[in-house]
């Protein structure tokens, strides 16, 4: 896997992406604490809405950004979005109203929705060989898992020295460092100075084809159901951790980082074990049991939140969040393999674009559900409802894709 590091451009782009992810992770912790300061025990509702806005930006802005990325130098787009994200992070500590949080989050995530597809489109150009490209993708996935573990731990350490407002400063530095690294890299991509760009298909047609592909192929419909199972379990982690830790368990702000870090640790350990596991079992044998583990863990969260906290509550929460992270990683990591196996090479961009939009659509449903249920009905009801959604989604995936499901031969997209 480390052979891809011989590519100088990839090293710099990967490092830029990893640094930006760490900055985003610091902002996630800081935003949770900012919401708690602004809204008190209704912080989960604020976070649920803010994260729903993030998903709206991802679903709505990403196709437009992909069309733009085909027409301007890719390095220019990446650097511009990093600078915009740094400016938003710089403004967040100064907000005094909840609506200001929502506006800034939309701008921040719109920039991220432009950055991510442009970054993903750059990697295949760096590695024409499929083996190298697969290794590069594995490294990127590991970066997400490491960020889930490292950012909360770094935030927890910083919170022992400074107030959470300074975490936003770390976010700004992360985005600025990312922009500097990208500027120093020879980023391939369309450049108007090199001559007229090849006309690209409209993003509406490409996205429509990808959605039709997902609806037509049973294995991809099952993958979408598994994405919903992950979104239901993950939403309670990202939305309700601050309320569960601060209000239910009465622990300090640094404990929020540790709880999120437990989720990241579970995800990372699973990501490291999966290559060996997937050599012995097929994707279905790994993904479905992991999906059914999610509602079981959430049933334990119902019990955890329904009784008065005791000395056992904090270790139980850490174990539950680590288990959710492990199961989510076991479902999400093989997803790219499923898409690759089901899709002709010419149709992979449309398939991955559709999966990006549809999976984030799942989070768009579960984020506000986790926030408003926790604020209105309490944490036990929230865990029960999201557990039921996760169970229903996992069961749907099982029914859609039986063990004997053959590899499909989808119709290729025509011009």
Image (cartoon, rainbow, N blue to C red):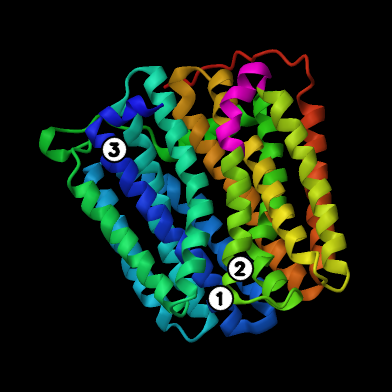
Q: Is residue 110 visible?
A: no
- Establish if 391 lies above or below 130: below
Which residues, given as a range, are shown in magenta?
270-282
Q: Position of residue 217 (x, y in %)?
A: 66, 23
At a point 78% along the width and 55% down the height, the residue shown is 386
- Decide which of tag 3 and tag 1 comes sooner along the chain: 3
- Which quarter shows the N terminus? top left
Label 3 crowd bin: few (<14), some (14–19), many (20+), radius 10 Å? some
Q: Which residue is mark 1?
A: 33
Classify residue 407 by image quadrant: top right
Tag 3 secondary structure: helix
Circles 1 and 2, Cβ within 8 Å, touching? The answer is yes
Which secondary structure type mostly characterizes the magenta part of the structure?
Answer: helix
- Decide which of tag 2 and tag 3 comes sooner along the chain: 3
Q: Which residue is mark 3?
A: 11
- Decide which of tag 1 and tag 2 comes sooner along the chain: 1
- Depth order, front residue of 156/75: 156
- Establish if 145 lies above or below 339: below
- Depth order, front residue of 316/12: 316
Circles 3 and 1, Cβ within 8 Å, touching? The answer is no
Circles 2 and 3, Cβ within 8 Å, touching? The answer is no
Q: Is residue 205 visible?
A: yes
At a point 42% along the width and 53% down the height, the residue shown is 21
């Amino acid at each position: 896997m480390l052979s891809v590091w011989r590519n100088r451009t990839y090293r710099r782009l990967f490092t830029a992406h990893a640094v930006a992810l760490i900055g985003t992770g610091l902002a996630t912790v800081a935003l949770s604490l900012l919401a708690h300061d602004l809204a008190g025990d209704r912080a989960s509702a604020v976070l649920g809405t803010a994260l729903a806005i993030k998903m709206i930006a991802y679903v709505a802005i990403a196709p437009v950004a992909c069309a733009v990325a085909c027409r301007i130098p890719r390095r220019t787009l990446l650097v511009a979005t990093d600078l915009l994200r740094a400016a938003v992070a710089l403004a967040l500590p100064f907000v005094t109203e909840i609506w200001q949080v929502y506006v800034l989050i939309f701008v921040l995530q719109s920039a991220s929705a432009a950055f991510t597809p442009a970054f993903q489109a750059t990697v295949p150009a760096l590695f024409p060989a499929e083996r190298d490209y697969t290794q590069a993708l594995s490294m990127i996935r590991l970066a997400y898992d490491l960020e889930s573990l490292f950012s909360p731990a770094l935030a927890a350490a910083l919170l022992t020295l400074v107030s959470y407002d300074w975490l936003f400063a770390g976010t700004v530095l992360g985005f600025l460092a990312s922009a500097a690294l990208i500027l120093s890299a020879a980023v391939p991509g369309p450049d108007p100075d090199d001559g007229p760009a090849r006309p690209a298909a409209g993003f509406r047609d490409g996205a429509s084809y990808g959605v039709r592909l997902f609806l037509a192929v049973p294995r991809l419909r099952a993958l979408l159901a598994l994405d919903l199972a992950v979104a239901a379990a993950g939403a309670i982690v990202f939305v309700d951790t601050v309320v569960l830790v601060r209000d239910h368990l009465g622990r300090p702000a640094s404990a929020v980082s540790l709880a999120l870090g437990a989720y990241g640790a579970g995800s990372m350990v699973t990501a490291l074990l999966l290559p060996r596991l997937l050599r012995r079992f097929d994707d279905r044998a790994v993904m479905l049991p992991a999906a059914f583990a999610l509602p079981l863990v959430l049933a334990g969260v119902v019990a955890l939140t329904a009784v008065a906290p005791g000395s056992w509550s904090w270790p139980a929460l850490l174990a539950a969040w680590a288990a959710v992270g492990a199961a989510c990683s076991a479902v999400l990591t093989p997803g790219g393999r499923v898409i690759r196996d089901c899709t002709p090479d010419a149709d992979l961009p449309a398939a991955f674009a559709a999966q990006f939009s549809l999976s984030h659509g799942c989070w768009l449903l579960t984020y506000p559900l986790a926030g408003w249920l926790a604020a209105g009905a309490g944490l036990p009801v929230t865990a029960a409802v999201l557990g039921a959604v996760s169970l229903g989604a996992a069961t749907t995936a099982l029914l859609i894709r039986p063990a004997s499901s053959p590899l499909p031969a989808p119709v290729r997209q025509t011009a």
